[in-house]
Amino acid sequence: MDLATHGGGSVSVNDAVFGKPYNEGLVHQIVTAYLAGGRQGTKAQKTRSDVSGGGAKPWRQKGTGRARSGTIRSPIWTGGGVTFAARPRDYTQKVNKKQYRAALRSILSNVAANGSLVILDSFDVAEPKTSAFVAKLNELGADKGALILVDEVSDNLWLAARNVPRVQVLDVDGIDPVSLVRSDKIVTTTAAIRRLEERLA
């Protein structure tokens, strides 16, 4: 299939990457797994067995007039353990490579079908100036949130884009489903398209 470029021409792309039907269930599964994999899961609290002290019974069982108690590290005591203590856990979900690539193809195909994919011959800035970068985005109609996807990120491009809100600059090897889904527009180059086809076809 052919996709229109910003300059008025067209570029031929692989249907296996940009011509797939949108699989909402698969995309949701992969996005959820990707976000879950970013969670640290390092939260930890102490149970009554982890808190130091409390080996001896604080007072005898009967005759004091107070409620019976076996340890000062009971959860109802100040300084005691936590009843349902948090434990370190792993939130990662298993995702097959085949599923992951199929989700990326589905997202890219949907972006291309919706007209949210802007293809350029090249995308770079002559100097690391944010004003020049923003002007370029305005010209492309991608000022409200965009993913700049290039074959290789230059230092000037990275420096010019790093302070612009809702704009992300990535190379082809760094793409992920969340970045693709969150972006209103994806601005990419012909070279990046070819790299995507090599990776996902």
Image (cartoon, rainbow, N blue to C red):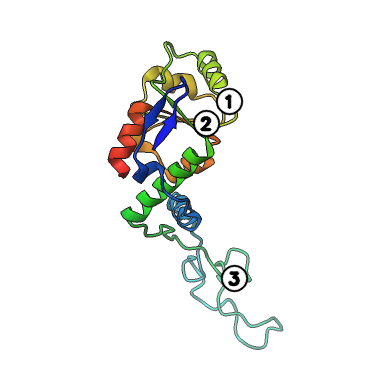
What secondary structure is found at the residue carrying circle 2? strand
- Mark 1 neighbour class, 10 Å CA radius: few under 14, some 14 to 19, many 20 or more: some
What secondary structure is found at the residue carrying circle 1? loop
- Mark 2 neighbour class, 10 Å CA radius: few under 14, some 14 to 19, many 20 or more: many
112 or 37: nearer the viewer = 112
Tell me the amino acid under the disc marked 1. Asp
Tell me the amino acid under the disc marked 3. Pro
Q: Is residue 57 above or below residue 159?
A: below
Which label belongs to residue 146? 2
- Mark 3 neighbour class, 10 Å CA radius: few under 14, some 14 to 19, many 20 or more: some
> Residue tagged by mark 3?
75
For marks 1 and 3, give the one nearer the viewer: 1
| Residue projecting furthest to the left | 198
Badge 3 or badge 2: first in the primary sequence: 3
Image coordinates for residue 169, horizontal then vertical, percent: 44, 29
Q: Is residue 65 above or below residue 51?
A: below
Q: Is residue 196 left or right of residue 7?
A: left
Tell me the amino acid under the disc marked 2. Ala
Where, quadrant-wise, is the N terminus in this rendering? top left
Give the spatial CA distance, label 3 vs label 2.
50 Å
What secondary structure is found at the residue carrying circle 3? loop
> Residue tagged by mark 1?
143
- Figure label count: 3
